[in-house]
Image (cartoon, grey):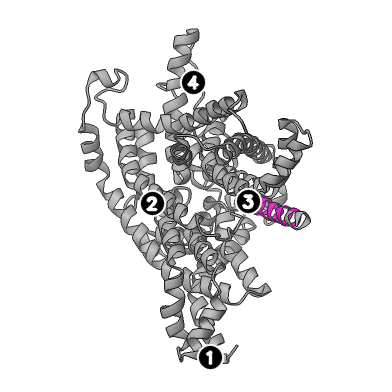
Amino acid sequence: MRRSDLFHDVVLIAPAAIVFGAFFLLPLVHLVMVGGSGPGGFAVYARILTDPLYLGSLISTVALSTAVTLATLAIAGVVGVFLSRNRFPGDALLVALLTLPLAFPGVVVGFLVIMLAGRQGLIGDISLWLFGDKLVFAYSMAGLFMGYVYFSIPRTVLTVMAAVEKLDPRLEEAARSLGAKPWHVVRDVIIPGLKPALLSAGAICFATAMGAFGTAFTLATRINVLPMTIYTEFTLQANIAVAAALSFFLGAVTWTALALARTAAGTSVAAAG
Amino acid sequence: MTGRGLAFYLQLAFTILVSAFLIVPVALSMIAGVTANYLEGVSGGLTLDWVVKVWGLYRETIYLSMAIALACLAVTLVVGVPAAYVLARRPSAVTRAIEELLVMPVAIPGLATALALIVTYGGFRGFRTSWLFILVGHVLFTLPFMVRSVLAVLSTIDLKTLEEGAASLGAGPWQRFFGVVLPNCRSGILAGALMVVTLSVGEFNMTWLLHTPLTKTLPVGLADSYASMRLEIGSAYTLVFFVMIIPLLIAMQLAGRSSATRPAARRGGA
């Protein structure tokens, strides 16, 4: 390419580079340094991993996010395959309804969980009517789980549907004509075919659940998940070094999950091709 | 397949159940926003009083969210579209690395990014207390979506041939960018723009830390009303939010459907 072209490309990408460098890379590096600026210096990063409170928060967040990811993949997998393989009246409406909450913010999802499972919630009313006992679980880990599954379903259904469109239906027919039972077709043909999509959708689910803050904020400040711990350290304790170090771990976990999934999905795509 | 067996109806029932799980609470909160008293239910009468009250209390947050979303769109267009073009034009290890970096704000939780911005720029009082501080956060978070969306379209068209054709007719690099490239990635720009506005209007994770008492956005106001107001006001406010965001989400579905008919290469990842 000509030199004037190179100049032109540099000019075009410069704004992105400047915005990104000044407001993302530089602050992020600074954040890591601030993490090491507390009384204990950079040892804070090691201390967090041995402190029962912080470690507990990290572990419970990872556990919650894993559970949310598995539940969402199971639900969205069934729904996504079903909707892309069957045509019936109202199917487009179901797809529209399932993907409507795609960009609902976490705070609103928290409020919707309260509408379902809060003190004046629908689930409580139904359980009171059925069993004479008011079921209220919005303000706990179970409420958080429900909220995270709620906002993960739309995106995952979309990913699964897009992946199913690319599967070759002839493979399933071949398996069926060779005598495979429906469950075996699912296990041996559909799930392996969807593996890259499930991996990448699962990683996004996991990362979003790890970093989600709005839902936990709306439901309760007492739920001990990492974003809430960071927020409490930063605002109530003014413990900026610990908040910064915890943010570093949070970012590292989510980024690693996404990177691993992309690598795994990439290699399995290559292996299949 | 002949006929529809039990499996079909079981899966249909499950799918309807999942849809209900997503839609019923939305409907409940919309209804709660217009009932005189939620405990009495709809029979207690419908009213717009709560919506009026929300408008009086939180009007400013709605204006600010709209202003930030539009400013964010302007910045991501000016910054993101040219960047996507360069990334598509020069597929190399360097541009791939740049692309990886550019999408990092989606992989790093907003809370961490917001903290990083505060510890770095929080000392500049004028900047910290202005709405521009929130705008910076929103631009970082939404830019990857604009870049991805434009890149996805650019990777399906034969950019090289188009540009060479234009160049052989005497078009310079700027003329090619504005006259040939931009018109060809309209659909990607539209999809990206809808995503950017929708995400900006709903962004909370960063904004909660970046806002000040004088720069409250709609989701910040929502969190505030959920914590301190009665259920009907929170619901009415949520209703106002839905009225703003649902048309955007439907437009996004429609735009997605029209581009899905083309064999667009979907880019995976976050």
How far is disc 2 from disc 1 in space, using C-alphas? 40 Å
Q: Residues within 10 Å of mark 3 (few under 14, many from 20)?
A: few
Q: Which residue in the structure is indicated by mark 2? A: B251
Residue B86 shown left or right of residue B124 in the figure: right
Give percent across and percent down for residue A249. Answer: 65, 50
- The three-letter code of the residue at mark 4 reads Val
Q: Nearer the viewer, mark 2 or mark 1?
A: 2
Label 4 with label 3: CB-CB less than 8 Å:
no
Q: Quadrant of the C terminus of chain A?
A: bottom right
To which chain does the residue with label 2 belong? B
Label 2 with label 4: CB-CB less than 8 Å:
no
Q: Determine whether the residue tagged by mark 4 lies in a helix, strand or loop.
A: loop
How far is disc 1 from disc 3 in space, using C-alphas? 41 Å
Overall secondary structure of the magenta stretch?
helix
- The three-letter code of the residue at mark 3 reads Lys
Whether labels 2 and 1 belong to a single chain: the reply is no
Q: Which residues are magenta?
A: A248-268
To which chain does the residue with label 3 belong? A
Q: Which residue in the structure is indicated by mark 3? A: A166
To which chain does the residue with label 4 belong? A
Taking the spot 69% from the left edge, 46% from the top edge, the residue there is A170
Q: Which residue in the structure is indicated by mark 1? A: A4
Whether labels 2 and 4 belong to a single chain: the reply is no
| Visible residue check, residue A52 | yes
Q: Nearer the viewer, mark 4 or mark 1?
A: 1
Q: Residues within 10 Å of mark 2 (few under 14, many from 20)?
A: some
Residue A272 shown left or right of residue B34 in the figure: right
Residue B59 shown left or right of residue B114 in the figure: left
How far is disc 4 from disc 1 in space, using C-alphas? 66 Å
Label annotation for residue A136: 4
Label 2 with label 1: CB-CB less than 8 Å:
no
Query: Relative to B74, does residue A178 appear above or below in the rendering?
Result: above
